[in-house]
Image (tube, grey):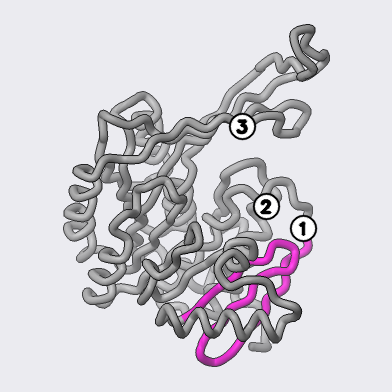
Amino acid sequence: MAGPSPRFAEWRERVAATRVLVVGDVMLDRYWFGDVDRISPEAPVPVVKVMRSEERPGGAANVARNAAALGAKATLLSVTGADEAGNALERLLAADSVQTSFLRDASIATTVKLRVIGRQQQLLRIDFETAPSHEVLAGKLADFDRLLPDAGIVILSDYGKGGLTHIATMIERARSAGKRVLVDPKGDDWAKYRGATIITPNRGEFRQVAGRWRDEYEMAIKAQALRDELDLEALLVTRSEDGMSLYTAQGADHIPALTREVYDVSGAGDTVIATLGVLMGAGAEIGTAVRIANQAAGLVVGKLGTAVVTPDELR
């Protein structure tokens, strides 16, 4: 697909009219920033004197805030605990113009990832998480049916935390309603994603399912076989410094990475699928959407932690 790089500005008005339904596992990303100037006398570990803290929506919540940052109307369906972290997520997402539909499960704790940062380096990450109950997940499916008619496109963000137990049913119902479905996969059981429009694994996730390859030709063979097996319109493999590879019935399309300083790759996949979703929802063909998503990824890896890209940055 030769020619000039597509520009987000050409789609900005249509993106603003796009309604995106994001469903998946949410988490609260907490950051403690501090100074490190000594080693603990109790153990050979650095002592961090915390100077400030930040909270940001993570997981599917980061996908939704990325979609909203690009101007789309984003609705997020998920499960959280009936706790302070769940309240913080609702507050942060409201500030990011994301409409939330949270099922609050009193039997679980909202997933929290706490990162301790010293001298611009991550020193420690602590995770708090429990899987939601079956009863709450059944209610989530009912809410999905309620929200689906207003959605222009559906993004399912699977972080393997148990919130997408009914993902195969969601894909089937969305496709029956004529909606395109994008999936960010997790784990090695991709049969549950059958019938999605496009899935967006990173290189490691794709290798876990397809096995290793010796060259680009063998990778393409594996990708097309998987695309056929899962009845996908497209398969997009994000490959870090090697860019992205898009596989469709028309063949393979390799998009090189944009050369930028890489500061933090966490959350880059969220930005990619959010950008893809809003553009495909706005009517862009997949090749165009992928190229603009690649531009967005090149920007977001230059930021610390889960972050968003704005239309002005994509100019």
Quarter of the rendering occupied by the N terminus: bottom right
- Number of numbered callouts drawn: 3
65, above or below 253, in the image:
above
Residue wearing tag 2: 301
Question: What is the CA distance from the residue labelled 1 to the residue labelled 2?
Answer: 8 Å
Q: Position of residue 274 (x, y in %)?
A: 48, 60
The crowding category of the residue bearing disc 2, from other C-alpha atoms within 10 Å (few below 14, some 14 to 19, many at least 20), is many
The disc, 1 or 3, on the residue closer to the chain's N-terminal end is 3
The crowding category of the residue bearing disc 3, from other C-alpha atoms within 10 Å (few below 14, some 14 to 19, many at least 20), is few
Q: Is residue 102 magenta?
A: no
Q: Amino acid at mark 2?
A: Val
Label 3 SS: strand
**Tag 1–tag 2 contact (CB < 8 Å):** yes
Label 2 SS: loop
Q: Which residues are magenta?
A: 234-259
Q: Amino acid at mark 1?
A: Arg
Question: Is residue 41 found left or right of 192 in the rendered image?
Answer: right
Q: Which residue is located at x 77 percent, y 58 percent?
A: 260
Q: Look at discs 1 and 3 and give the one toward the viewer.
A: 3
124, above or below 135, in the image:
above
Q: Which residue extends farthest right? A: 38
User: Which label is found at residue 260?
Assistant: 1
Q: Look at discs 3 and 2 and give the one toward the viewer.
A: 3
The disc, 3 or 2, on the residue closer to the chain's N-terminal end is 3
Label 1 SS: loop
Q: Position of residue 272 (x, y in %)?
A: 55, 62
Question: Is residue 120 found left or right of 66 in the rendered image?
Answer: right
Tell me where residue 189 sits by quadrant. bottom left
Question: What is the CA distance from the residue labelled 3 to the residue labelled 2?
Answer: 19 Å
Residue wearing tag 3: 125
**Tag 1–tag 3 contact (CB < 8 Å):** no
